[in-house]
Image (cartoon, grey):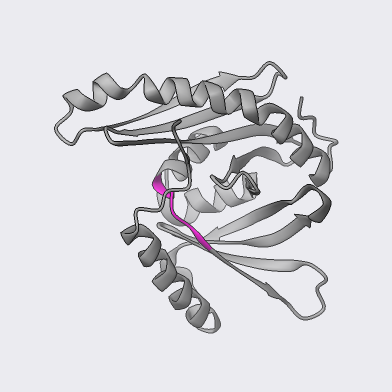
Amino acid sequence: MIVPSMNSEELVVEVYRDLEVVNRKANYLTQGLRRQAIKTKGKYVQRIFDYKSLRHNQWFIVSDHYVKDPYFTVVVYYTNHLGLNGILVDKDHRTLMHFTSHFLDRYNERFLKMKRASHLELLKRFIPANSVQTIMTFHENNSTKKQIFGRFHEGVGLGYKESFIERGKVLHHFNTFISNEMVLRHQFEDYNTLGKLYEGLKEEGYMRGKKCA
């Protein structure tokens, strides 16, 4: 079970201890949407399911069922002294994306502008709407951390990257969110470069979730 005292590597280990069972559940739930999808005009339906794992971790599953191409995204969430955090598992099973409570606050403040929304509501709103992302890694002066600049559909995420080479895993920490209109002049080049990559991924039908078996 995830506890607030865990460091980043312990979090990664705990997520992957849960993942096989969570993926099986997600696959089952997503396949179960086929009949509903067939009945819709666009042959598509999306649902978000809550799931508590056998290890007592709280997950939610975003199931997108296109009749010919169902897929799902899984996110585990937990609370520490700073508030609610979400960790999304990318479809490559190697990359994790960590969204902090501060990121969610800024997402709401600078984009959604919802009143009295909980962090969990914000996370469940952000993930389905930003299923495509591109990330650039760079070093800032006087920093030992690899900084990240991530382009999403609704804006930009800023944070840093941790790599766990022996485990073959990468953890992207997104600490804050800025809307597309707030991108600074010195960020334009990175923003535009990632924008081109982002549009290319959309055209190729790239989705962050895992396809159903």
Q: Is residue 188 above or below residue 118?
A: below
Question: From this viewpoint, which residue is outermost toward the top?
Answer: 54
Foreground of the two, 176 or 88: 88
Residue at (62% x, 33% y) in the render: 76
Q: Is residue 89 left or right of residue 82?
A: left
- The quadrant of the image that shows the C terminus is top left
Residue at (63% x, 41% y) in the render: 87
Q: Is residue 159 left or right of residue 208?
A: right
Q: How many marks?
A: 0
Q: Quadrant of residue 55?
A: top right
Q: Is residue 20 left or right of residue 188?
A: right
Residue at (56% x, 20% y) in the render: 51
Foreground of the two, 187 or 137: 137
- The quadrant of the image that shows the N terminus is top right
* Range of residues picked out in magenta: 129-134
Question: From this viewpoint, which residue is outermost toward the front?
Answer: 213
What secondary structure do most residues of the magenta stretch adopt? loop
Residue 176 x %, y %: 60, 57
Residue 31 x %, y %: 38, 23
Residue 49 x %, y %: 46, 23
Residue at (25% x, 27% y) in the render: 37
Question: From this viewpoint, which residue is outermost toward the left?
Answer: 41
Q: Is residue 162 left or right of residue 116?
A: right
Is residue 123 on the magenta stretch? no
Is residue 133 on the magenta stretch? yes
Residue 43 x %, y %: 21, 33
Q: Quadrant of residue 146?
A: bottom right
